[in-house]
Amino acid sequence: MASKKRKKKKWQLRSRRLAAETDGKKMVWLAFDLGLQGDYEGLYTWLAKHGALECGDGLARLRYPAGPKSIASFLEKLQKSLRGGVKFDDRARIYVIFRDKNAIRGRWLVGHRRRSPWEDYLPSQKSSADDVSST
């Protein structure tokens, strides 16, 4: 009995994943830090308009229209939409995480990486603008 439930659950997960890929929208996670004086009202309005789900402090998941174009054009469109609805100052940061073929990628849409508080605990590491992890 438990085996049938597991199989059904796996099938449901695959169906959801397939639906997410075929409806013209791409699943993305936005990690955001606008600072103390940031335009959270504008960001929360933008997230609500796009049906985002809360995933913890400063993290949201949403499905954004992808279109048939490249990842670069998708990210540019997402960035332009965010900048149209939210006022960003010099301290604001938004990092997007998304699937691209068989890799999980990340890129800064607003701002850049800062020095990590835990940096002093490990040897120095260099990072790039894009983060990639194979799945």
Image (cartoon, rainbow, N blue to C red):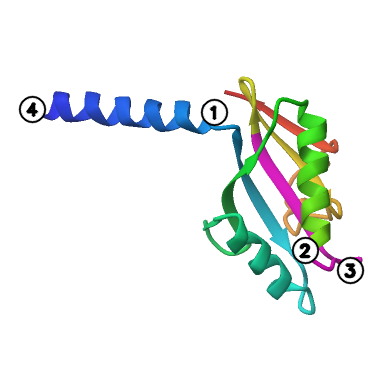
Disc 1 residue type? Answer: Glu
**Which residue corresponds to mark 2?**
85
Q: Is residue 113 above or below residue 106?
A: below
Q: Is residue 106 visible?
A: yes
Query: How far is the residue under mark 3 from the one under mark 1?
Result: 34 Å
Depth check, front residue: 67 or 47: 67
Q: Is residue 123 visible?
A: no
**Which residue corresponds to mark 1?**
21
Q: Secondary structure at mark 3?
A: loop
Image coordinates of residue 4 in percent, x first then y, are 15, 24
Image coordinates of residue 124 in percent, x first then y, are 83, 41
**Which residue corresponds to mark 3?**
89
* Farthest residue, direction bottom: 37
Depth check, front residue: 50 or 111: 50
At x 39%, y 26%, the residue is 14
Q: As drawn, is 126 to the left or to the right of 44?
A: right
Disc 2 residue type? Answer: Gly
Part of the protein shown in magenta:
85-98
At x 86%, y 55%, the residue is 111
Image coordinates of residue 24 in percent, x first then y, are 60, 32
Q: Residues within 10 Å of mark 1 (few under 14, many from 20)?
A: some
The image quadrant where one finds the N terminus is: top left
**Which residue corresponds to mark 4?**
1
**Disc 4 to disc 3: CB gap under 8 Å:** no
